[in-house]
Amino acid sequence: MSDAPFHNDLADGPDGGYAAWLHCSDGVRIRVGHWPLPRQVGPEKADVNGTVLMFPGRTEYIEKYGRAAADFAARGFEMIAIDWRGQGLADRLLEDPMMGHVGAFTDYQKDVDAVMAWAEQQDLPKPWYLIGHSMGGAIGMQALHAGLDVRTAAFSAPMWGIRLSKITKFFAGFIYRLARMLGCTRRYAPSTNSASYVLDAEFDDNMLTRDPDMWQHMQSHIHAEPQFGLGGPSIKWVGTSLQACADLLQRKAPDLPIITFLGKNERIVDVEAVHQRMNSWPNATLHLIDDAEHEVMMEVLEIRTFVFDTCADHFTAHP
């Protein structure tokens, strides 16, 4: 472990935030960020309610969650976030750094293992709680099945399926198998390219947030630190992710109380898959949010307040 770059001015999070490099079991270098709270001396640490483990989505990075860390700090929680392999400042896996790629979806569990070992070494305040957003929701679900050491979990627009048109969904498996035979799975998935969505899309009708300040905040990050940018996924990423989602839906839900948030304007993840999973999960609550897009933690103030208050209440109810 060693110190890693951390853009506190961009994160807009609580004071004291920092980042560290971690090396996974296969040698891939990832980055973890931590926003601590002042703690009492002694083992009780009664002034901290616990630590939130933020599992971000595809294309995301630690600093994007600085404001979320501030919201949780105001409610008595420390927070960590992760640059998954292939994005943020973590090692990019292909010659084209703008292509989102992973060799196998289960490789993300190597990142989880490295982060959890680091969290133990740092003696982060327990209990620990998981929030999985989008792709982080699928990674988090896999981790829960593997025995992730958290008391409970929350999910934000979890990627338990990827939203595809009917014709694309029909041909997706065939395209992936053909690409594997031709040895071209390390090319951009059809209809995608190297452009970062937040720089390429217009605010009007964007799929992430209705809050113009949050939209500008996200854009400012990529302008200031181009290495945060990430374009479309590789064919390999799409193929292995679709298979992982299908496998997760076939498994019994983990024995854990959870809450999930889903915007009624969701256009990125498969809404039907989220409902399917939630309907089969005992002791689970789904919050459908009017007029919200994909990023409910980066929506307008009223929605953000509801999400963070509900998460804090859910977490403190399971100490």
Image: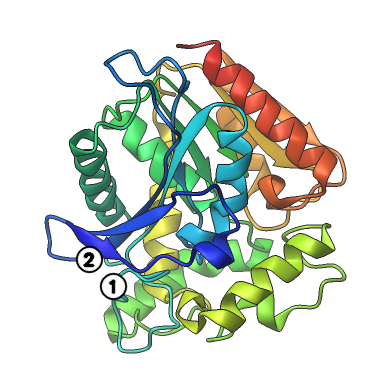
**Residues at badges 2 and 1 in contact (C-beta under 8 Å)?**
yes
Disc marking residue 29: 2
Residue type at mark 1 is Asp
Q: Position of residue 83 (x, y in %)?
A: 39, 60
Q: In this picture, is 71 found above or below 205?
A: above
Question: In the image shown, does 25 or 218 lie closer to the viewer?
Answer: 218
When asked about the image quadrant of residue 130, the answer is top left
Inter-mark Cα distance, 2 to 1 = 6 Å
Q: In this picture, is 299 found above or below 97?
A: above
- Going by the image, does 181 lie left or right of 251? left
Q: Position of residue 288 (x, y in %)?
A: 77, 33
Q: In the rendered image, which residue does mark 1 sit on?
A: 91
When asked about the image quadrant of residue 201, the answer is bottom right
Q: Position of residue 49 (x, y in %)?
A: 48, 21
Residue plotted at (42% across, 57% down): 241
Residue plotted at (50% across, 16% down): 257
Can you see residue 282? no
Question: In the image shown, does 15 or 57 lie closer to the viewer?
Answer: 15
Q: Position of residue 319 (x, y in %)?
A: 45, 11
Q: In this picture, is 185 found above or below 135?
A: below
When asked about the image quadrant of residue 156, the answer is top right
* Image quarter (top left, top right, bottom left or bottom right) of the N terminus: bottom left
Q: How many dots with numbers?
A: 2
Q: Residues within 10 Å of mark 2 (few under 14, many from 20)?
A: many
Residue type at mark 2 is Arg
Q: Residues within 10 Å of mark 1 (few under 14, many from 20)?
A: some
